[in-house]
Image: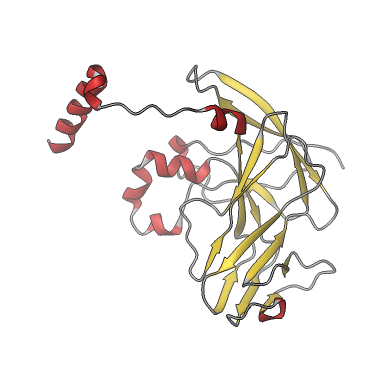
């Protein structure tokens, strides 16, 4: 098939505009726009290339800004850091609903995964024991040199009874795909519905993180910043 671009994630200022709809998946390329940390607003583009590994690749879509826990109190959407995090990446979606049940024991057979729809290649399995369920994405992601991908659960979307395991994937050199893993937190059953995200990916630059040297200062060492903080505090109290 041909190639088509996957839209960049919805910016926080557009909360609600997407209406929660997922766009169609693509083969490649996926172009993301980053911002140079030393020059705010300066666009630095790169391609995140998404290689479909066959007919079992799961749906891929821009991350949703909406969260069910926020819908109960829409005021939460006014928190810019949280709303930005919600949409700062892309999500891999369940191609069918799955029910996961764990007895609490350590063995592989202590965890069972039942798919709503049968398929030659189940995308969720018990692979590591200890109550861990493994999701196969069906994608191989490639990034330019120096860029990696965080793979995690969708931000600010807790799921009762199970917790996502987070990894940093060195997609600038790895020639093979990764799996997404979730850890059951107690014996029982957990559901993932069809179309529900099971993995959230977002780019990062490991070299910049490793080179970063935090500097500790007293707020009084930065008088202009201290004045801005005082003005903000006063405004909040008004």
Residue 91 or residue 17, whichever sits in front: 91
* Residue 82 appearing in the image: yes
Tell me which residue sits at (67%, 61%) in the image: 94
Tell me which residue sits at (74%, 72%) in the image: 117
* Residue 205 appearing in the image: no
In the rendering, at what x and y percent does residue 23 appear? 65, 47
The mark total stands at: 0
Residue 169 or residue 211, whichever sits in front: 211
Tell me which residue sits at (72%, 28%) in the image: 145
Residue 78 or residue 167, whichever sits in front: 167
Please identify the quadrant where the N terminus is shown: top right
In the rendering, at what x and y percent does residue 13 appear? 44, 35
Residue at the far left: name it.
238
Tell me which residue sits at (24%, 26%) in the image: 219
In the rendering, at what x and y percent does residue 65 appear? 49, 46
**Residue 27, quarter of the rendered image:** top right
As displayed, is residue 105 above or below residue 167?
Answer: below
Residue 177 or residue 78, whichever sits in front: 177
**Residue 26, quarter of the rendered image:** top right
Please identify the quadrant where the C terminus is shown: top left
208 to the left or right of 224: right
As displayed, is residue 206 above or below residue 87?
Answer: above
112 to the left or right of 159: right
As displayed, is residue 65 above or below residue 36?
Answer: below
Colouring scheme, one of rainbow, by chain, secondary structure, one colour: secondary structure
């Amino acid at each position: 098939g041909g190639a088509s671009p996957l839209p960049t994630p919805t910016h926080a200022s557009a909360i609600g505009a997407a209406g929660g709809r997922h766009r169609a998946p693509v083969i490649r390329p996926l172009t993301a726009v980053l911002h140079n940390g030393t020059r705010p607003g300066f666009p630095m583009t790169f391609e995140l290339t998404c290689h479909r590994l066959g007919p079992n690749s799961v749906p891929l879509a821009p991350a949703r800004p909406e969260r069910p826990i926020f819908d109960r109190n829409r005021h939460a959407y006014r928190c810019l850091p949280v709303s930005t995090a919600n949409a700062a990446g892309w999500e891999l979606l369940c191609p069918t609903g799955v029910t996961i049940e764990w007895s609490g024991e350590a063995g592989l057979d202590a965890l069972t995964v039942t798919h709503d729809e049968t398929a030659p290649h189940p995308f969720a399995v018990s692979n590591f024991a200890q109550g861990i369920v493994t999701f196969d994405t069906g994608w191989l992601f490639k990034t330019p040199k120096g860029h990696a991908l965080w793979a995690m659960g969708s931000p600010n979307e807790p799921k009762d009874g199970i917790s996502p395991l987070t990894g940093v994937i060195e997609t600038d050199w790895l020639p093979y795909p990764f799996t997404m893993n979730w850890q059951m937190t107690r014996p029982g059953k957990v559901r993932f519905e069809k179309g529900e995200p099971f993995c959230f990916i977002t780019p990062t630059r490991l070299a910049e993180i490793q080179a970063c040297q935090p500097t500790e200062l007293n707020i009084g060492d930065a008088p202009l910043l201290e004045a801005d903080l005082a003005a903000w505090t006063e405004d909040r109290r008004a």
